[in-house]
Image (cartoon, coloured by chain):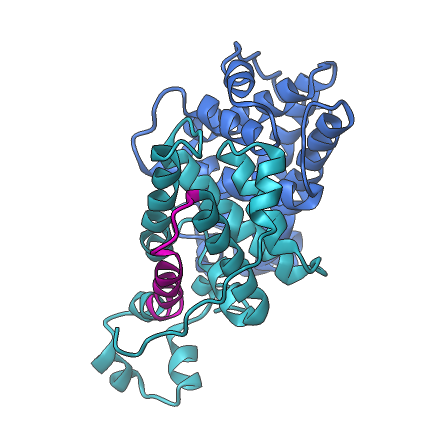
Chain colours: A blue, B cyan
Amino acid sequence: MAERGVDAVGLSEITAAADLGTGTFYNYFQSREEIVEAVAEEAIESLGKRLDHLTADMSDAAEVFAFSLRHLVQHALTDPVWGWFTVRLGVAHPKLIAILGPRAARDLRKGVDSGRFTIPDLDIATSCVFGALLSTLHQVLSTEAASNIDQVYAQTMLSMVGVPAQEAQDVASRPLPRLPEASVSE
Amino acid sequence: MAERGVDAVGLSEITAAADLGTGTFYNYFQSREEIVEAVAEEAIESLGKRLDHLTADMSDAAEVFAFSLRHLVQHALTDPVWGWFTVRLGVAHPKLIAILGPRAARDLRKGVDSGRFTIPDLDIATSCVFGALLSTLHQVLSTEAASNIDQVYAQTMLSMVGVPAQEAQDVASRPLPRLPEASVSE
């Protein structure tokens, strides 16, 4: 799916790759789409939760936003299969929107409420962050990316939400705190 | 393809819908992917050329950029099949990148050269405009869109390239000149 696109992979390929009979597959999943949703849930929701933990106690909305976006880009560089899977899910995939959309909206609202961000429309800004993330991931995965590409993307998004250029650069280039490990208890 | 995604449509469905034999299909196209490229070329390149004509003599890079982005959003609202096809091609489709990427990069460079835009990295900004367009199109096609959604998107993108908030709103809300008709001679 990461290689060729989510819709291009048939059920027979999935069961063959997993060395499962079709009957066994249907003991676990109702349809091909359900396994895509399960993979998305596992792969993206878990990262979302780690970002929630990282930023829970941070007070500056611009830092929360920038750190989260930078970790998403760095995660794709560290784990290109994850990155390609996310890119291939695409801007229209309901699961991806359901996982990342509310988090982006929450972080943007925090910035607006604290006066840090200026945004004409929260829904469109959320969509734009999300689409820009996927196309940035696509670019960093398919070309030779500069080492600070995560900072460049975060700076670009900070500008988009109305942070002045110099301030956007400053916030985006701060030392990136490590992401907490995934917790098995969740 | 617009309904279910480009990769989800098989060659047999294409030939059935066109009432063509598979042999006849292969007289015109070498593969399924070639017909996708031909449709993309026809559907998106032609709009790109009309935008080129519209903006060729405009001097303000911010207007060129905003008018082009607004027409892309309005075109998707006027012709939802076009919009869905574009969304379903996705951020990773080489043809879409080849058609829209250089135009976006050209318009952004014009803004940087004239001092109108402040951008940390032209390639990433181009990617972000492109991804944000697809996710905005997806949102306007799948939800009840406000009537000025094209202006909101353009304003958001002007902010992203460093135009101050008030100025971005002003430029994005100017009367939108009509798009020239497609010329058959090209």
Percent position of residue B119, x then y: 43, 30
Say left or right for B69 vs B59: right
Total marks in image:
0
Q: Position of residue A57 (x, y in %)?
A: 74, 14
Which residue does the image show at 60% across and 25% down from the upper left? Answer: A163
Instruction: Examine the image and state in which quarter residue A117 appears.
Output: top right
Q: Determine whether A51 is above or below A38 in the image.
A: above
The one nearer the camera, A179 or A149, is: A149
* Front-lying residue, A114 or B183: B183
**In the visual, does B25 lie left or right of B67?**
left
Instruction: Report the predominant secondary structure element of the magenta stretch.
Output: helix
Residue found farthest to the top: A175
Residue found at x 61% / y 30%: A162
> Of A112 and B55, which appears nearest the observer?
B55
Position of residue B127 relative to residue B24, above or below, is: above
Query: In this orientation, does residue A130 appear?
Result: no
Q: In this view, does A6 lie above or below A175?
A: below
Is B44 covered by the magenta stretch?
yes
Is A77 in the magenta? no
Looking at the image, the residue that sits furthest to the right is A113
Residue range corresponding to the magenta coloring: B39-61
Percent across and percent down for residue B70 are: 53, 56
Residue at image point 63% right, 58% down: B140
Image quarter hosting the C terminus of chain B? bottom left
Task: Please tell me which residue is depicted at 66% across the width and 59% down the height of the picture.
Answer: A30
> Against A9, is A180 above or below?
above
Q: Nearer the viewer, residue A136 or B61?
A: B61
For residue A104, say whether it is visible. yes
- Residue A130 location in percent, x, y? 57, 41
